Amino acid sequence: MEAAHEWEHSGLFDTDAHTDTHVHSEEEEAAVLAVARSIGDPEQGKILFNTVRPEVSFACATCHRVDSTETLVGSGLLGISGHSHNHSVPDSNGTSDAMAGMNMGEATAEATSEPEQTLEQKVEFLRTSITNPSAFVMTGFPDNLMPKVYGAIFTPQQINDLIAYLFTLD
């Protein structure tokens, strides 16, 4: 977790710096990979993300873009680990994600006024979003769109690997 702590305070989580055109230096990429590896195995997470699961008949990649913030079926995930999510403020649909309903580009602009979350908070948000997707339903998306079985079909290590992979999407 030391690498995660260093990365968190390095400014790499600064939401102003996370845009679709942001280019990382080799040092930044190494720091991102160190944080991801402190969570799980991002290479295994990428495999899991792209593998069709027989329990749901599709892969995560079927519904989520990793190269964009644009919606496919679900939200685009580019830069997901670098965006703040204030879960304490309900949106108009009563969900607890203050940025629900915004695409990630809009969330970036809005997030600058919100306090930055810790690595642990970001990991927990992603874990909850995978294992209990009804906890944070984005405006414009129906509840129950994302299957609620991932907590049962993925092991805790596989979920960590998926989260680690999501941390590399920038």
Image (spheres, rainbow, N blue to C red):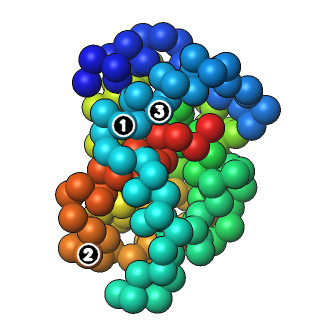
Residue under the point 35% across and 28% down: 119
> Disc 2 designates what residue?
153
> Mark 2 vs mark 1: which is more N-terminal?
1
User: Which class describes the residues within 10 Å of circle 3: few (<14), some (14-19), or many (20+)?
Assistant: many
- Callout 1: SS: helix
| Residue 93 placement (x, y as % from top left) | 47, 58
Q: Nearer the viewer, residue 49 or 26?
A: 26
Distance between mark 3 and mark 2 Cα atoms: 26 Å
CB atoms of marks 3 and 1 within 8 Å: yes
Is 116 situated left or right of 110 in this image?
left
| Residue 10 placement (x, y as % from top left) | 48, 11
Distance between mark 3 and mark 1 Cα atoms: 6 Å
Is 70 situated above or below 21? below
Residue 157 appears in the picture as rendered: yes
Residue under the point 23% across and 55% down: 157
Closest to the camera, between mark 3 and mark 2, is: 3
Q: Nearer the viewer, residue 97 or 92?
A: 97
> Disc 3 designates what residue?
33
**Quarter where residue 64 is shown:** bottom right
CB atoms of marks 3 and 2 within 8 Å: no
